[in-house]
Amino acid sequence: MLLPSKVKHRKWTKGRRRAAVESRGNELSFGTFGLQVISGDKWIDSRHIEASRRAIIRAMKKGGKMWIRIFPDKPVTKKGTEVPMGGGKGGVDHFVFPVRPGRVLFELDGVSEEVAREALRVAGHKLPVRTRIIKR
């Protein structure tokens, strides 16, 4: 799974959710086909990214190249079960990447359009947001 090797601050604040359209990372930069978020202002967990990556690799069958355009660097904390109120913030549980509509998550190149569409379709089902397949 994707984890940052070193972070400047161990625990972050939750942040404010903005229902705006993404202004950066919304166009294809490397590949010919891509998976783009179309709805939802959600957090994509490192487990979601890993599941999607494995689905794409399996569908491509050792052909082509894949780029992951996001990296989960936002720490999410969680307190243990049955812990009473107080006692400060919990420890870091996992890492996420907050996505907004328009962000390109994965890019593919070197495979036919049918293979790329099937791979990205399967990968989109592993994510907590609605996605669409885009082509250069």
Image (spheres, rainbow, N blue to C red):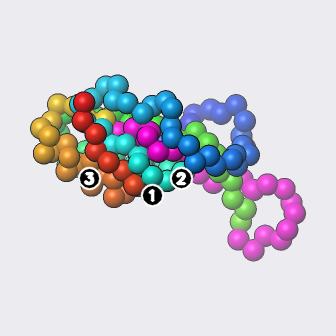
Which residue is rendered at x = 70% and y = 46% of the image?
15
Q: Is residue 120 magenta?
A: no
Disc with the residue nearer the chain's start (1 vs 3): 3
Q: Secondary structure at mark 2?
A: strand
Label 2, residues with CA under 10 Å away: few <14, some 14-19, many ≥20: some
For label 3, the residue is 121
Which residue is rendered at x = 31% and y = 25% of the image?
30
Label disc, if present, on residue 42 of the rendered structure: 2
Image side of residue 119 versus residue 46, left or right: left
| Residues at marks 1 and 2 touching, judged by CB atoms closer than 8 Å | yes
Q: Nearer the viewer, residue 67 or 29?
A: 29
Above or below 124: residue 24 = above
Q: Which residues are magenta?
A: 81-106
Which residue is rendered at x = 79% and y = 54% of the image?
89
**If the image is split into quadrants, where does the C terminus sit?**
top left
Disc with the residue nearer the chain's start (1 vs 2): 2
For label 1, the residue is 128
Above or below 38: residue 67 = above
Give x and y (percent) for residue 55.
28, 51
Which residue is rendered at x = 33% and y = 58% of the image?
125
Q: Amino acid at mark 3?
A: Arg
Image side of residue 121 versus residue 15, left or right: left
Q: Is residue 92 magenta?
A: yes
Above or below 64: residue 124 = below
Q: Amino acid at mark 1?
A: Pro
> Mark 2 and mark 3: span between their CA atoms?
19 Å
| Residues at marks 2 and 3 touching, judged by CB atoms closer than 8 Å | no
Q: Can the viewer see residue 75?
A: yes
Give x and y (percent) for residue 130.
39, 55
Q: Secondary structure at mark 1?
A: loop
> Mark 1 and mark 2: span between their CA atoms?
7 Å
